[in-house]
Structures are given as C-alpha cells and as structure tokens.
Image (cartoon, coloured by chain):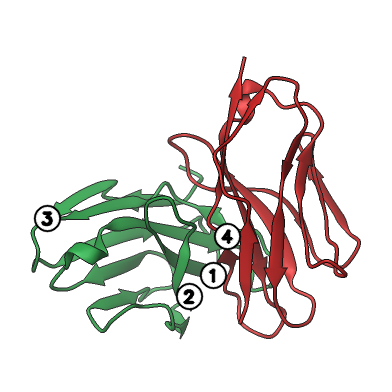
Chain colours: A red, B green
Amino acid sequence: GNSVTQMEGPVTLSEEAFLTINCTYTATGYPSLFWYVQYPGEGLQLLLKATKADDKGSNKGFEATYRKETTSFHLEKGSVQVSDSAVYFCALIPNTGGFKTIFGAGTRLFVKA
Amino acid sequence: GAGVSQSPRYKVAKRGQDVALRCDPISGHVSLFWYQQALGQGPEFLTYFQNEAQLDKSGLPSDRFFAERPEGSVSTLKIQRTQQEDSAVYLCASSLGTSNTGELFFGEGSRLTVL
C-alpha cells in the first residue's frame, strides 16, 4: 500500500543551523509529494510540493527534491530561524485514482535563539 | 473569514453520547476531506466529498461515524455512541478542484475528548 515514513522528532537546532528532515515513501507509479507545516495553534498549511521525478519544490527558504530512485523527498533549509519551530508533515497523493492525501507521522522542530 | 472554519474547537463528551462536528470550507471549493489526528500522529483519512457526493468513505473506522455534505458546501461529521478511542483532533480540509496535485486548505480542527 501507499505510505510515508519520516524521521522521528523532536529535532532541536540552534538558529542559523542547517536543517534536514528525511522522508521516504512507498507508492506505485508516480505520486505527487508534499510538505505541510503546522505552526503552534494553527492548522496545517502547504509548504511546498513536487509532482514529478526530479522536480524541486521550494518556499520560504525550504527545498525538497523528488527522488524516484531513492523514493525520497527530504526537506532542507540552509539557515533556520526561531520562527521555523513547528511540526512538519511529509505527504503524498497516489496517481492511481482517488484524491486521498496520505501523511507521515510528523517531525517536530525546535529552533533555539 | 476566508479560510476553513470548524466548530466546535473543543468538545468534551461522555462515553455513549453522540457528537456533531461542523466544517465550513472555503467558498467554491469542490473537494472536502475529513481527517482524524491522534496525539503525536499525522492526519489519517476518514472520508472525501466532491460537491455533495461522498466518493470515498473507506477511512471511517466504524458505522458509528457518519458524514454528510448535503448542499455541497458545509459538512458535518457525526459520531454516535462515542468511545474513548474516538478522542482525537478531527480536521477538515478543502481543495479547489479534484486534481491529485492539489493543495489542501485545513481548518484548525475540532478536539474531541471522550470521558
């Protein structure tokens, strides 16, 4: 079946550190891949997406590249800020019919000043 | 407002009570989803509407769960005879179209606690 696995948190970094949150997926064909972010007290919101192999999604300094060969979609940011503290969810929508988004368990990020 | 609105934000129910959770999607959004999020977990799919048609209800955990969207806008998730394992945050999300590349817009959720 379709599934998403992401690294367990929490991840604690100092401001301006480099961030990587690993995400791998299992799906048939070519799913669309997403990163959603949930800031404290808010609903989930889309951070970035990629819809085909080798695409790079980017937003707010975050990037993730769709790697079909390793079935991965790792999230990276070169220099994190305190305001990036949130829970990050990797997700996919299979291209085999249906519109169900399947989410990973989430990774909590704490950034210290 | 312009976003997805859910009510109530918090609900405490005694075991065996019925609850109803409401979702107001973004105006004009065709697709509407309900998800269940347990503490420390990612959202788990419950059901999907395209306008008023419920096209997928494969994620509803039991026949105690029922969802409707009778006029293709507001949706209600009803849970009958609540159990402690129903305690979770229930998320509603809407999407403009029906594409599998589409962005979901989430509400802040309804947190249900069953005592």
Q: Marks 3 and 4, Cα distance to the nearest angstrom?
A: 28 Å
| x and y percentages locating residue B25 in the rendered image | 46, 58
Q: Mark 4 highlights which residue? A: A104
Tell me if residue A52 comes above or below residue A7 in the rendering: below
Q: Marks 4 and 1, Cα distance to the nearest angstrom?
A: 21 Å
Whether discs 1 and 3 lie on one chain: the answer is yes
User: What kind of element bears circle 4?
Assistant: loop
Q: Chain of mark 3?
A: B
Q: Mark 3 highlights which residue? A: B115
Crowding at label 2, few (<14), some or many (≥20) Cα neighbours within 10 Å?
A: many
- Contact (CB < 8 A) between labels 2 and 1? yes
User: What kind of element bears circle 2?
Assistant: strand
Q: Mark 1 highlights which residue? A: B31
Q: Nearer the viewer, residue B25 or A29?
A: A29
Whichever of callouts 2 and 1 sits on the residue coming sooner in the sequence is: 1
Amino acid on which the number 4 mark rests in the picture:
Gly
Crowding at label 1, few (<14), some or many (≥20) Cα neighbours within 10 Å?
A: many
Disc 2 vs disc 1: which is toward the camera?
A: 2
Picture quarter with the C terminus of chain B: bottom left
Q: Marks 2 and 4, Cα distance to the nearest angstrom?
A: 19 Å
Amino acid on which the number 3 mark rests in the picture:
Leu
Crowding at label 3, few (<14), some or many (≥20) Cα neighbours within 10 Å?
A: few
Disc 1 vs disc 3: which is toward the camera?
A: 3
Crowding at label 4, few (<14), some or many (≥20) Cα neighbours within 10 Å?
A: many
- Contact (CB < 8 A) between labels 1 and 3? no
Amino acid on which the number 2 mark rests in the picture:
Tyr
Q: Mark 2 highlights which residue? A: B48
Q: Chain of mark 2?
A: B
